[in-house]
Amino acid sequence: MSFSVSILGSSSALPTSERNLTAHLLNVNERFFLIDCGEGTQLQLRKYKAKISRLDHIFITHLHGDHTFGLPGLISTFNLLGRKKTLNIYAHPDLEHIIFQFLSFFIVQLSYPIKFHPLIFNSPQLILENGKMTVHSFPLKHRIPTCGFIFKEKPPLRKIRKELIEFYKISPKDIPDIKKGADFITEEGKCIKNEILTFEPGPAKSYAFCSDTSYTEDIISQISNVDVLYHEATFAHEDQALAQATQHSTAVEAAQIAKLANAKKLILGHFSARYKDVTHLLDQACQIFPNTMVAEDGLKIII
């Protein structure tokens, strides 16, 4: 199953000529999930040729403009395109009022329903589950209520050896149970063990999104062993006082979280516009967590 994330925006607060405001697009088996929606997000979706007709779920970490100002325009564009499917938005309860105030002024009749799913900000919460994956929110530490999100594949079914289907005359109705781990009884009454008929699937994949937040080890239990961790690194280590004052993180702190969580890969992002070059932030993080990379607009990470 495909599982990848595309960086649509990697700047904080202010867009730059090279970095848009925060937004990530997660692709899970060609179904798309948008995480945050900073100003200009729909232009980035167009630029990087995202299949927006398959975008049915939007997750908003918190109600700061650099994470939400792109949402009204995207909702309007969906309407102009004649969308019919429900759009699900997971966010602070206040966002529903804000969006419907916008709609009442600018859009006479919306062509599709919007369903708001209110987040809570004091404990982890299962907010989405389907046959393929789960999504949990969890509290971050910022100036206003803020959530992180972790997207996890459900453990995949075992893979059946196709050449053995005909050999043992396995009927189609038996295949689902075999994929779930069942043995097979032949017409002669012989038991064929599941480990002969199948092989292990690939491991379940996961992606965690942590922005905006100051350093907090409270999130470790939620993101433990994640395949890819995106963690904000608004400031360099030498600007730690600014990070503390604004309740953001440094690159060093992001790396410390990745190490404690036993993450496989760390992506730094949400960079302050004060840094024209973020190479030194990467260098600082790599001293603690070597498997670190920086977010760049347009970057696609296969998980």
Image (cartoon, rainbow, N blue to C red):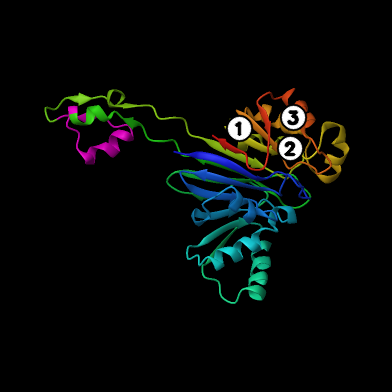
For the residues labelled 1 and 3, the Cα–Cα distance comes to: 22 Å
Count of picture labels: 3
Rendering quarter of residue 269: top right
- Which disc is residue 216 wearing? 2
Residue 261 visible, this angle: yes
Which one is closest to the eye, mark 1 or mark 3?
3
Rendering quarter of residue 63: bottom right
| Residue 137, above or below 174 | below
For the residues labelled 1 and 2, the Cα–Cα distance comes to: 14 Å
* Mark before the other along the chain sequence, 1 or 2: 2
Residue at numbered disc 3? 282
- In this rendered view, identify the residue nearer to me: 80 or 38: 80
Residue at 63% x, 35% y is 229
Q: What residue type is labelled 3?
A: Leu
For the residues labelled 3 and 2, the Cα–Cα distance comes to: 20 Å
Q: What residue type is labelled 1?
A: Ser
Residue 58: % across, % down: 58, 54
Residue at numbered disc 1? 224
**Magenta stretch: includes residue 27:** no
- In this rendered view, identify the residue nearer to me: 63 or 1: 1
Looking at the image, residue 134 sits to the left or right of residue 182; the answer is right
Magenta range is 167-186
